[in-house]
Amino acid sequence: MKLSDFDFDLPEDLIATRPAKPRSSARLLVAEGGTEGQRISDAHVYDLPGLLRPGDRLVLNDTRVIPARLSGLRRRDGAQGMTEARIEATLLGPRADGTWGALIKPLKKIRVGEDIHFAAGLSARLERVADGQGHLRFNLDGDPFDAALAEAGSMPLPPYIAAKRPADAQDREDYQTVWAEHTGAVAAPTASLHFDQPLLDALAERGVDFTRVTLHVGAGTFLPVKVDDIADHKMHAEWGRVSAEAAAEIAATKVSGGRVIPVGTTALRLIETAAAETGQIAPWTGDTDIFIRPGFRFHVADGLITNFHLPKSTLMMLVSALMGTDEIRAVYAHALAARYRFFSYGDASLLLPAQ
């Protein structure tokens, strides 16, 4: 298939820059496949208890977003005395050698071996540059590093929001799920941002079950597809884990006839990775670069709760694989006509393909 098959025109004013308040008041487009065609209806996220069945299982990504955007100073003692340069660093994730990959701007203002001094006593030395990324070694690690980063950093808002406004204190709450636990993401699993505790309680009372998995969302989720034939696209890799307990819970739901519905494309990609080898969900840990596009055979997911995605993105390809390309075109045509809000802070959809 061609990249143009996943394009559409999106009015700029439909890109949300703040989330709905309260979280569960966001709009929800419901698309259900069936033998007589797809049905589309309009609801709100707080309607989910009436849309799901007892015995259904929601799969939640419990990654925690780090305040990965840092601003600091490079100091250099030269012939003209001490000079300074303002350096912006966006952390991309830890590396096996103890350094952090980072996007550094302006990269030309710092040399390998020089330090960047941030707030809260945090500093980092540029050890090397490879593939346009800097490798930074921080002066702190463990809990002291987490505490300093929490003070010095800001939330790494997606580029389509950051282009409209800077991150602020409210984003520290808004851009984090209520069940966030394991630190490591530089982008939020945004479908999960619609859930608050009252909604979780109502779902539990309805008889809906929950399973937590972890996938640390990387900045690669925002990389554009640059090839015309989508089969030539290489996906970025992200670290994830499906515990033995999580795999057993999901397997039990499949056996009992309940539906397994990931909350977000990250949770979906992870559980399908964990089932890729045998066709059955199993414990799994590692880096996944699974590319779900039309023609993909789903082994675990029976549906998906997700936001509305960028034109020509791999996530548009994923939802097209789940529902069908023509069906997703109809979903997005409805969303545009009904002025749903798009992207990370936007509205949501419940996608239920024909069984």
Image (tube, rainbow, N blue to C red):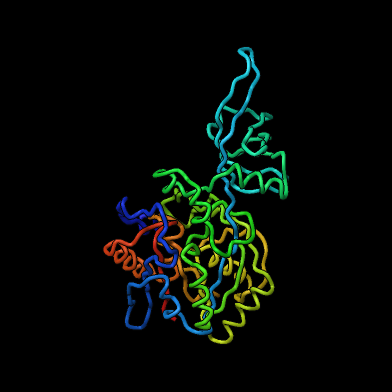
Query: Which residue in the rendered view is the most extreme toward the left?
Result: 337
Left or right of 62: which side holds 285?
right
Res 343 → quadrant: bottom left
Q: Is residue 63 left or right of residue 18?
A: right
x%, y% of residue 288?
60, 60
**Residue at 33% across / 77% down in the picture?**
39
Quarter holding the C terminus is bottom left
* Closer to the camera in the image, 351 or 296: 351
Give how far across and how far down residue 255 sits, in percent: 59, 85
> Looking at the image, which residue sits at the far top?
79
Q: Quadrant of the N terminus?
A: bottom left
Count the numbered circles shown: 0
The residue positioned 38% from the left and 78% from the top of the image is 33
Quarter of the image holding residue 89? Answer: top right
List x then y, in percent, for residue 60.
56, 68
Residue drawn at 52 percent across, 47 percent down: 156
Which percent across, then down, holds residue 181? 63, 61
| Residue 309 makes an appearance in the image | no
Residue 158 higher or lower than 215, as above or below: above
